Image: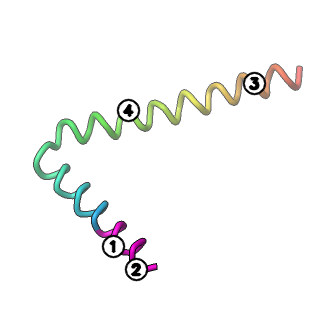
Amino acid sequence: MQVKKILTYVAIAFVAFYLFTKPAQAAEAVNGVFDGIIRGADQLAVFFTRVLT
């Protein structure tokens, strides 16, 4: 369990460092993630629409 906690802190530190040193690139990365989630949700909606019709 200690390794998991340490890796979590390292990941948080990396994200904070990235946000402070390259905010524009961090914003683009977040937008990319949200775009991917939205695309996936749209594809699921299409799938279920076609299955149910």
Q: Nearer the viewer, residue 8 or 29?
A: 8
Q: CA distance from mark 3 to mark 1?
A: 40 Å
Tag 4 residue: 32
Q: Amino acid at mark 3?
A: Phe
Tag 1 residue: 6
Q: Earlier in the sequence, mark 3 or mark 4?
A: 4
Q: Furthest residue to the right?
A: 53
Q: Amino acid at mark 4?
A: Gly
Tag 2 residue: 2
Q: Amino acid at mark 1?
A: Ile
**Which numbered disc covers residue 47?**
3
Which residues lie in the magenta part?
Answer: 1-9
Q: CA distance from mark 3 to mark 4?
A: 22 Å
Q: Furthest residue to the left?
A: 21
Q: Earlier in the sequence, mark 2 or mark 4?
A: 2
Q: Dot 1, how many residues are within 10 Å of its Cα: few (below 14), some (14-19), or many (20+)? A: few
Asked which secondary structure carries label 2, the reply is: helix
Q: Amino acid at mark 2?
A: Gln
